[in-house]
Amino acid sequence: MDIATIVGMLSGTIFIAWTILLGSSLMLFWDTPSVVIVFGGTVACVFVGYPLKDVLSLVKVTMKVFMFKVEKPENIVANLIEISNKARKGGLLSIESDIANTPDPYLASALQMTVDGVKTADIAAVMQKKMDLVKEGNGTGAAMFTSLAAFAPAFGMIGTLIGLVQMLANLDDPASIGPSMAVAMITTFYGAIIANLFCTPMANKLKIRCGEEISNMNIIYEGVISIREGEHPKLLEEKLNVYLGPNKPKEGGK
């Protein structure tokens, strides 16, 4: 679970509520028609702008913001070097037990193809295609949240315009102008909150998650291809340590 995401959203909500309570009541900022126009209109635009399969996958993509845990790159590197050493000593068939014990389906599939004697070029093509699909899925999810961040304030403004038109139509009652203006502005408030506290940060978090996931997949890609080609484990280690960066721990404390 991503504690930072939850803490950020909760603290942002609390600060906003606290600010409201310092000068008024929370109920002053609740208006059912405003909720309907902002939330309903925003969701409707997503259905218009994206294929149904992408919209339906939004819940799954959203879980990556809150629940997705990325394996530490140094653990992946250490595991691949261990597998490489085993393959060099006992042959490719000796790593079959590692396939069963691997929780990562991407790595397990690549190792299975390696053990089965699939050509290096074919293994590389399959692994690259899977990476492309992950990029596409995460990219679409981030794009949808970016779109939500744009649609919500727009519908907030539409709700405000509706409220202003209704207010101007009843100028014969001066006492109602103030309350009507307040209700008209609430939709803009809702749109700004949705966009800036939720949708834009979630789009950014998805982009970061995608980068981390693809980086790990690249490590696995390099490792499996090296194992398939029978390269020396030390050479593999040097290749993979590049992904860890200069300030991260290397295998063997290097």
Image (spheres, helix red, strand yellow):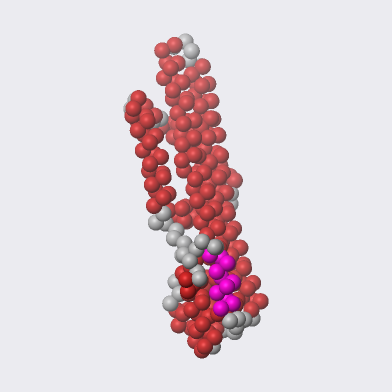
Identified at 51% across, 32% down, the residue is 156
Closer-to-camera residue (149/46)? 149
Image coords of residue 153 (percent x, y): 53, 35
Residue 126: which quarter of the image? bottom right
Image coords of residue 194 (percent x, y): 47, 39
Closer-to-camera residue (103/183)? 103
Image coords of residue 253 (percent x, y): 47, 71
Question: What is the magenta segment's predominant secondary structure?
Answer: helix
The single residue placed furthest to the front in the displayed view is 254
* Residue 232 visible: yes
Q: Is residue 19 left or right of residue 113?
A: left
Identified at 44% across, 20% down, the residue is 180
Image coords of residue 20 (percent x, y): 37, 29
The single residue placed furthest to the right in the displayed view is 121
Q: Quadrant of the N terminus?
A: bottom left
Q: Is residue 2 magenta?
A: no
The single residue placed furthest to the bottom in the displayed view is 90
Identified at 47% across, 26% down, the residue is 185
Classify 156 as above or below 6: above
Closer-to-camera residue (246/8)? 246
Residue interval drawn in magenta: 234-244
Identified at 53% across, 21% down, the residue is 165
- The mark total stands at 0
Classify 70 as above or below 85: above
Classify 203 as above or below 170: below
